[in-house]
Image: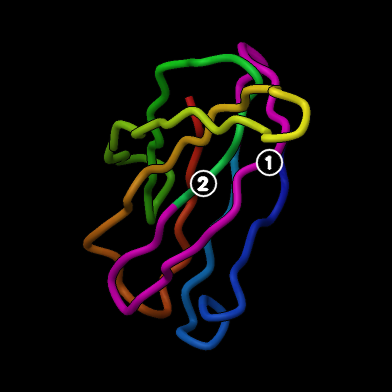
Amino acid sequence: MAGEVTHPRAAALGLWLYALALLPAFATSHSPYLQNVGGDRATVVWVTREPVAAVVEYSADGKQWRAVPATSRALVNRVTGEVRHQHQAELSGLSPGVVYHYRVL
C-alpha cells in the first residue's frame, strides 16, 4: 500500500510525509495516518487485525533512514468483542518545510 498521507497541520507547517511502503506481512484495518503533528515531530498511527511488532523508518533524503519502534495496544469493540491492535510510532527531530518519507515495517 503506497500513497501520500498528510495531516492538515502538516500542510500549515510545510511538513509533508509520504508513505513509501506498507509491507503486506500484516493486514491493516486502518491505513497509516498522522496525528500530533508539531514543529519537529509527528506520530504515525495505524490499526491491524493481528498483534504485530512493527517499526517505522523515516528519512528526508530516502537514503539515510532512522528507525523508531512502534508501541501497540489492543482495542476491544464493546458491541462485537472484536479485537484490533493500534500501533503508533513517534517521529522526532523533523524540520519544517522538509519532505519526509516513511515506511511501516
Residue 45 image label: 2
Position of 82 relative to 32 (above/below): above
Few, some or many residues within 10 Å of mark 1 (<14, 14–19, 20+) = some
Secondary element at image label 1: strand
Few, some or many residues within 10 Å of mark 2 (<14, 14–19, 20+) = many
Quadrant position of the N terminus in the picture: top right
Q: Give the residues drawn in magenta, as a range.
A: 21-43
Position of 94 relative to 20 (above/below): below
Residue type highlighted by circle 1: Ser
Residue 31 image label: 1
Residue 16 percent across, percent down from the top left = 53, 68
Residue 90 percent across, percent down from the top left = 32, 50
Q: Disc 2 or 1, which lies upstream in sequence?
A: 1
Name the residue: 32% across, 79% down. Answer: 39
Which residue in the rendered view is the most extreme toward the front? Answer: 79
Name the residue: 39% across, 52% down. Answer: 61
